Image (cartoon, grey):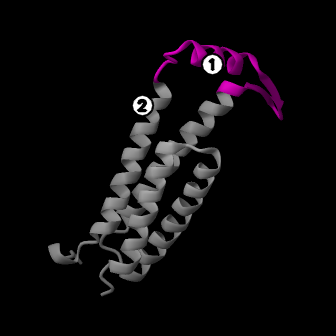
């Protein structure tokens, strides 16, 4: 059943948009080459530092990039999950948004511990928008 324009879950859509933009910004930032001597040296050191892992050896740079791609992919996944819930029952939307709000809250805390300024702002905003969707999403 299609929802009327007045009953569309706008806070959920806004949260999904923030998550997609976060993934795009993070992917672009991660893809930029180092632009200072300090960053070039750090990149060189991270590329040289190797860790033996079960089944493979990875450099610190590979681990860093892998976790970065994972972060972007999880943002897209949560956004798609929220968008997939449009048109579903309000109780289902609310459950999904509760999971997203809690996860983005955890991401905000973790980002704060390691002082990732821009992700903290993006995750915090996504958390607030997901929480608003819980409070303001039409229930019928």
Residue at image coords 65%, 19%? 42
What is the crowding at mark 2: few (fewer than 14 residues within 10 Å), some, or many (at least 20)? few
The label shown at residue 43 is 1
Residue bounds of the magenta highlight: 32-61
Whether residue 56 is visible to the viewer of this picture, yes or no, is: yes
Picture quarter with the N terminus: bottom left
Spatial CA distance of label 1 from label 2 is: 17 Å
Identify the residue under disc 2: 28
Residue at image coords 50%, 30%? 30
Residue at image coords 44%, 51%? 122
Q: Position of residue 72 (x, y in %)?
A: 49, 43
- Residue 108's quadrant in the figure? bottom right
Q: Where is residue 101 in the image (x, y as percent from the top left)?
A: 49, 67
- Residue 29's quadrant in the figure? top left
Q: Earlier in the sequence, mark 1 or mark 2?
A: 2
Residue at image coords 42%, 45%? 22
């Amino acid at each position: 059943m299609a929802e009327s324009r007045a009953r569309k879950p706008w806070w959920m859509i806004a949260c999904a948009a923030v998550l997609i933009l976060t993934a795009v910004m993070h992917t672009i930032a991660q893809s930029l080459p180092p632009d200072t001597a300090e960053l070039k040296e750090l990149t060189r050191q991270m590329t040289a530092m190797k860790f033996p892992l079960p089944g493979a050896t990875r450099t610190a740079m590979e681990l860093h990039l892998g976790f970065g791609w994972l972060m972007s992919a999880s943002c897209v996944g949560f956004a798609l999950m929220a968008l997939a819930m449009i048109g579903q029952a309000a109780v289902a939307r609310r459950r999904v948004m509760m999971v997203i709000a809690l996860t983005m809250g955890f991401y905000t805390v973790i980002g704060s511990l390691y002082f990732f300024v821009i992700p903290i702002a993006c995750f915090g905003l996504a958390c607030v928008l997901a929480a608003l969707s819980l409070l303001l999403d039409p229930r019928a």
